[in-house]
Each structure stands twice: as C-alpha cells, then as structure tokens.
Image: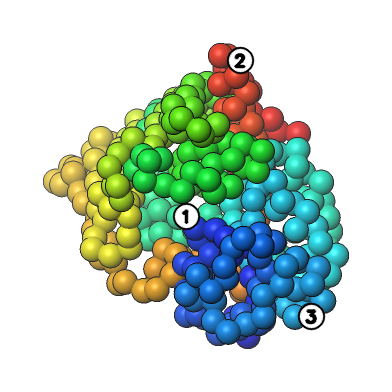
Amino acid sequence: MTDQTIGYVGLDHHHADPYLRTLGELPVRVTGACEPNPAFDPSSVPSLGDVPVYDDLESLLAASAPDVVFLTVPNRDTPAAIDRALEAGVDVYTEKPAARTAAELEPLIERVEKGDATVGVSYPWQSHPIAQELASLVDDGFFGELRAFDARFVASQLAYRETSHFIFDEEASRGGILQWLGIHWIQLLTRLLEEPISRVNASMVAGTDGVDVEDGATLQFETASGALGTLQCGYYLSKTLYDTKLDIYGTAGRSSWDPMGREFGFDGTTILELDDTSGEWASTPHRTITYDYDPEPGYGGAWGREFVESFFDACDGDGDPPVTLADALVVLRILDAAYESAETGRWVDVGTA
C-alpha cells in the first residue's frame, strides 16, 4: 500500500478513536477531520492529533483534498456522504451498514461499479484468523451439506450505554442491536455459507424505557437449499460483558466458536472447536484450533489492521476491497427482511433485485 492522506468524517462515534489508532499503525496520514455535531468536542478523541477539524464534509474536501475519507456518521447520512466523496473523486472507507435500508444504498452501486473510486465497508470480522479458517473448511468441504447454523451476540444492558447517541435513534439508524452488533454475524455468515439466506422470520422488542429501537431480537433464517439458522441478540448483561457464539452444522462436520469471549478485547486466546462426522478424522474426530492474540492498537488489533490494509491495497488498484458496497447491499436486504418480519409477524423473503 502507498502513502495516502485521510480525511476523517464523524468523530462523535464509538469507533472513531479505534479506527484512528488503526490508521496510526499504517503508512497513511490523517490531514483533516469533520464533525457536524457542534456540541461534540473533537479534543475528546485522543488519537485524532493536531489536525484541522471542519464543520461539514464539503469544507473538509475543499481545504484538505484527502485521497480517502473514513466515514463514521449516522446510517441516515452515510449514502449522501459517499455520494459527495465520489463526486470529488475520493475513495471511501465507511462504517457498516452504510445505509438504513437497501433502497438507500442501491443508487450508489452502479455508480461505484462504473467509476474509478474505491468504496469499502467496515466488516472486519471476516479477516479474523478463525473466520478465515472457517472459510477454508467450508471451501474444503469439511462440513459436507449445510444443515444448520446458530449465532449469538449478547452484550451489556443499555443502562450502561450512552442511549442518547444516534446509534440508538430510530430516525438516524433505523434499528438497534440487530443493525449495530448482530449485523456482524449476519455479514460473516453471508461470507462463510456457500448459499444465500433466502428468507427470515424475526421477533424484536424495544424493552428499555426512553429507547425506541430494539434491545432484543431473535431471528430464524432459511437458506436457498433449506438449511436453518438462528441469531439471538440482546442488551442483557452486566457492564462490559459479552456472550457470543457462531456454530455451523453439516452432514460431515460441525464447528463451534466464541468470537469475543467474556469481555470485549483482542488479547488472550480464542478457540475453534471442530467435530468430524465423516470418518476422515477417525483417530481424532474432535479437534481444537487456538489463536493467540498479539495485542496491537486499533479496532480488531492485528486482524482489524489487515482488513484496513486490504482496503488501501484496493485503492492502489490491487483487487477489490474486502467488503464492497454490493456485499453490504446483501446484508441490508437481510436486515430489511428481518425488520419487515418483526412488523408483520410473517416469514419474509430476502430481496435479490
């Protein structure tokens, strides 16, 4: 990757400081920033450094002329920000999910595909070494015919979180825990499974006073071949605690993985458990793969940095970004089906148009 200048847009965001720490580990330079919220103090972002901060994206683009903009703005505002960056010929790295709905993102897809700018969406869990190991196992046929998958993303209660922030605002974000945390596992499943999720059945509850987005969600999935899956999400736990899982079941093998551990962080170890039912591993049908983290600054540590590096490689013309807008559109269509199902009480087909 070559040296790039970065304009950071959206400092009032939980991921702004971690992303800036990731950028600090790379041969890039943040030359300016933008924060539209006048009530937010940019000096509260430790990793920003001494760079000019503008009130809007237009001013940042005009004064700083960055090669790339990093966007961590409300889902409502992300498509317009991407569009404006594209008009300026600037590459874009944006926080997921890149829009509130598939319909909001769709107009940008053809423009990006026909243009020269690179747009990447931040779903870095697919770069985790265990996720890559799972992808290799799927490619090698370890699981045989997919039968089921089971995912869970449970986090600390909203009593411990800043619920006045826009990520918990329905108009700005569209949803709650599903579009903020559960979405990570939905996206990862779209990469790991060899067939698309074709329909969804969902139930959601907004159970926290003063918060109008869901703090709990249960989803059922069905794939094109009839495999069944579930996802449980909820802000249910004590402060700083997490309870996550991602399990896959096939006719020839199964896997079990706790991606996050008891407390969020990228140190210690994480373990993938595997069971072969095909007879290929007759002597040791149960195996474990342990990944030892090498702690590094930034979101996702070393593997989060590698995801961002892959985006910058794409900006230099070396392939596509690890997650494209078209990939993000697939995830948003699944979310659209989930929210419609929660409203109607019916199974809803995932759009493919």
Residue nearest the viewer, comparing 149 with 274: 149
Give the position of the C terminus as an image quadrant. Answer: top right
Left or right of 89 on screen, residue 227: left
SS label for mark 3: helix
Mark 1 crowd level (few <14, some 14–19, many ≥20, 10 Å Cα): many
Give percent across and percent down for residue 247.
34, 38
Chain-order first, disc 2 or disc 3: 3
Q: In which quadrant of the rendered view does residue 152 lie?
A: top left
Instruction: Name the mark nearer the viewer: 1 or 2.
Output: 2
Q: Residue at x 64, y 51 (%)?
A: 74
Residue nearest the viewer, comparing 125 with 255: 125
Is residue 255 visible in this depiction of the protein? no
Left or right of 188 on screen, residue 98: right
Tag 1–tag 2 contact (CB < 8 Å): no
How did the renderer colour the structure? rainbow
Q: Residue furthest left?
A: 283
Q: Residue at x 30, y 47 (%)?
A: 239
Q: Residue at x 48, y 27 (%)?
A: 206
Give percent across and percent down for residue 131.
40, 53
Residue behind mark 2 = 344
Residue behind mark 3 = 63
